[in-house]
Image: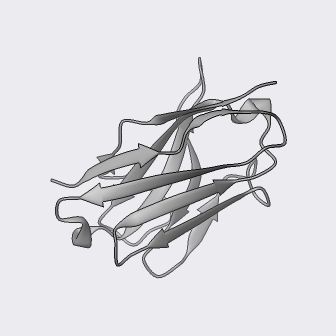
């Protein structure tokens, strides 16, 4: 069973930056797509960014030009660089992974989440 562990969340002021990391353990070599989703209080979980092993990416419109997803496939890790953060980016951010090489659709594995709070 693949396990995903997120790190890097915290409190940041508006306009600031954070970098989230996610490390996969177990048979992580079976993973193809990896991504980040988020859930704000009272809202549904939504896609933030997703990347395949081949480097195809998919971003939510709300984060394009501010967030960048990257991965190290040799290590089973995925990162999310978040710049120009806004209060509306406040949410629990979840790492997710799938065995299929797609930039949309269901994910097979989920982390427990890391809280990002953007506030002055």
**Residue 72 left/right relative to 46:** left
**Residue 86 left/right relative to 7:** right
Residue 108, compared with residue 88, is above or below; it is below
The quadrant where residue 105 appears: bottom left
Which residue extends farthest top?
Answer: 42
Residue in the foreground of this view, choosing between 105 and 63:
63
At horizontal 80% and vertical 37% (from top left) the residue drawn is 86
At horizontal 30% and vertical 67% (from top left) the residue drawn is 31
Residue in the foreground of this view, choosing between 16 and 33:
16
**Residue 93 left/right relative to 5:** right
| x and y percentages locating residue 69 in the rendered image | 59, 63
Residue in the foreground of this view, choosing between 26 and 17:
17
| x and y percentages locating residue 55 in the rendered image | 52, 78
Residue 59, compared with residue 32, is above or below; it is above
| x and y percentages locating residue 106 in the rendered image | 39, 52
Residue in the foreground of this view, choosing between 107 and 110:
110
At horizontal 55% and vertical 39% (from top left) the residue drawn is 9
The quadrant where residue 14 appears: top right
């Amino acid at each position: 069973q693949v396990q995903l562990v997120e790190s890097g969340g915290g409190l940041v002021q508006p306009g600031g930056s954070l970098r989230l990391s996610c490390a996969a353990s177990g048979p992580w070599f079976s993973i193809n797509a990896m991504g980040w989703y988020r859930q704000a209080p009272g809202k549904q979980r939504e896609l933030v960014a997703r990347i395949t092993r081949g480097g195809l990416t998919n971003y939510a419109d709300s984060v394009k030009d501010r967030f960048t997803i990257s991965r190290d496939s040799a290590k089973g890790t995925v990162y999310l660089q978040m710049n120009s953060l806004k209060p509306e980016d406040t949410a629990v951010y979840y790492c997710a992974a799938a065995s299929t090489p797609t930039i949309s659709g269901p994910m097979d594995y989920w982390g427990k989440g890391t809280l990002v709070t953007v506030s002055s």
